[in-house]
Image (spheres, coloured by chain):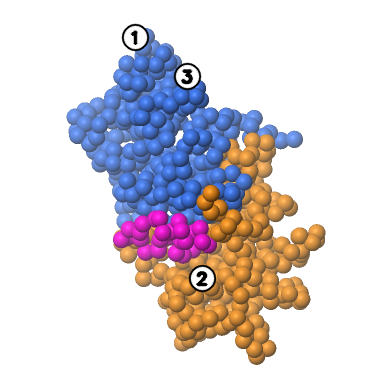
Chain colours: A blue, B orange
């Protein structure tokens, strides 16, 4: 018998599959390389495209409303568009629906999608509905960016500053609270259930031309730093005291671990040229949490450097919420 | 309790959901209107985009190989791109995989996708993998077309000729054979298991500027004629004797019913200006099967006209293979 998926995990699978797909000359980023695939379509523009499949048992906590399911399904894809600094053109949503669902439930999902798309200046362009054994939503978002403004996972140089939008650890704290049978505060719960794709921030950051690499942190800060490290051939040193957290998260005993090693926060992690910090500050609100180094992923805490372990959300070997 | 999906069927659901999604000024075709959504992206070009979710129990007959599953998942989306006369830019494929699948099985799915994409001059750009309770593949294809060459479901005028590429009824005949426990001949089985998206034909037909409406017949000829009728405000009269069938299908007792009322044949159904027939013949191979009328969907058989009933594949109330 051959090896099974449960034996190798998602990252190894993606690596194997990426090796099967060929990359044409117009493809700037191909399968498995970045938050989005990027295709040169001429006229100095690139099309960016991303897809994410979410489903009931793994991605939608029991108490999530259908409206939130719809919002989430659009938001996770828009977050990938944001990570490329691109302008979204729209989304298509394929929905696998169990026949016993109420029509109103599905309409509420659609309303959540619509509100999310419209909130970020874009549209639900179309989709597909299908009878399925489990509620499953596969969204695809497309966007456009100027070729000369394209930001990628690679590009960071030692000495660049490491930055992040918003707060980290909120979605993880909310999820843990839910698993322990209580609800967290409003802002913390919203981070888990109604994540905000950083479309405006992504566009403004790309326009500064000072961003040297970018991705979203949906799989957690640690995993994302390792991804940027592999893509760019650099290391990182981040400072525990500088990681932005909501007060309700910062006061928890394991706040730092939530902020570094849980996923579901759809913030942008990016690096900038240090001389451009003043200009980038005008683009949007963010925190500087560290600097790019030659190698290694370190976290400095009370003056001591430690290696930040590569741990976080990975599909196929876990059923932990949330994913993207 | 509210109404359930199984009470209303797919078409009514799509109508309800389409009403929820707003349509921006740059959107030429929106949700639920056509084989693809169509977005004006400037420079006289349109982006076309389509998504389809397929899954084990409904879409992949037991004896389908993983390679064929991959091919099929790409082909159904490319067929929608073909129906717009567009040039495919690429596909993204979201895959829900059961953890007990063998790695080699999933690699074979990827190889089938890759071969299909490369056969039609395009690429698998990226995707998403996810642990799922049932093998589920949601593909999305994007393409480009010149705005002035865009063909739509609407646009047919009374007097136009009704045409179709390839042969009809093959996939239905193959499926019935499988259900009866035997295999049909090679060409018939391939129509079901390795459908050919008519990319070259779609491009060549659009370039003639003589095509007044087009769609693919994946849900069956009858359903497709009704769709074109609703979109264009016209009727159709087709001639039973002119419907193209492979010899192995034509000899069956219910050949006509297979050709008109089973899905899974990914051929292009289109209408052309009658004066342009000679020019269009140079674009690709096809059969003229009837003419556009003012109203009604009629089939002429041995000199007698009958209404062609609107029956065919519809999701949510059936588990019949195949779908798209």
Q: Which residue lies under the disc numbered 2?
A: B227
- Judged from the image, the secondary structure of the residue bearing numbered disc 2 is helix
**Which residue is pictured at 40% across the width and 30% down the height?**
A189
Q: Secondary structure at mark 3?
A: loop
Seen from the viewer's position, the closer of residues B197 and B130 is B130
CA gap between label 1 and label 2 equals 68 Å
* Mark 3 and mark 1 residues within 8 Å of each other at the beta carbon: no
Residue B234: x and y, percent?
47, 79
Number of the label disc, if any, that sits on residue A302? 1
Task: Tell me if mark 2 has few (under 14), some (14-19) or many (20+) residues whose alpha carbon lies within 10 angstroms of its own.
Answer: some
- Residue A230 is one of the magenta-drawn residues: no
User: Which residue extends farthest bottom?
Assistant: B303
User: How many angstroms separate mark 3 from mark 1 (CA)?
Assistant: 18 Å
Q: Which residue is mark 3?
A: A309
Which residues fall within the magenta stretch? B11-38
What residue is rendered at 59% in x and 72% in y? B310
A193 displayed left or right of B201:
left
- Residue A44 can be seen in this image: yes
């Amino acid at each position: 018998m051959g090896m099974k998926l449960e034996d190798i995990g998602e990252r190894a699978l993606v690596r194997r599959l990426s090796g099967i797909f060929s990359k044409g000359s117009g493809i700037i980023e191909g399968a498995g390389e970045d938050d989005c695939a990027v295709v040169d379509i001429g006229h100095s523009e690139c099309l960016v495209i991303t897809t994410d499949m979410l489903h009931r048992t793994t991605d939608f906590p029991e108490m999530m409303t259908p409206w939130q399911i719809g919002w989430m399904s659009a938001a996770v894809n828009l977050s990938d568009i944001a990570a490329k600094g691109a302008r979204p053109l729209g989304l298509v949503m394929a929905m696998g629906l169990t026949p016993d669902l109420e029509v109103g439930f599905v309409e509420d999902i659609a309303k959540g999608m619509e509100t999310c798309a419209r909130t970020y200046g874009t549209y639900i362009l179309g989709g597909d509905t299908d009878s399925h054994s489990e509620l499953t939503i596969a969204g695809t978002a497309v966007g456009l960016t100027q070729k000369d403004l394209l930001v990628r996972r690679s590009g960071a140089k030692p000495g660049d500053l490491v930055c992040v939008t918003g707060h980290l650890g909120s979605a993880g704290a909310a999820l843990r609270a839910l698993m322990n049978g209580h609800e967290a505060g409003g802002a913390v719960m919203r981070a888990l259930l109604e994540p905000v794709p950083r479309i405006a921030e992504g566009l403004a950051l790309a326009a500064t031309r000072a961003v040297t690499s970018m991705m979203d942190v949906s799989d957690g800060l640690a995993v994302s730093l390792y991804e940027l490290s592999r893509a760019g051939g650099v290391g990182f040193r981040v400072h525990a005291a500088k990681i932005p957290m909501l007060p309700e998260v910062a006061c928890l005993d394991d706040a730092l671990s939530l902020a570094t090693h849980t996923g579901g926060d759809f913030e942008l992690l990016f690096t900038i040229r240090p001389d451009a910090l003043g200009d980038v500050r005008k683009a949007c609100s963010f925190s500087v949490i560290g600097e790019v180094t030659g190698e290694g992923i370190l976290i400095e805490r009370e003056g001591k450097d430690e290696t930040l372990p590569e741990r976080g959300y990975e599909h196929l070997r876990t059923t932990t919420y949330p994913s993207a």
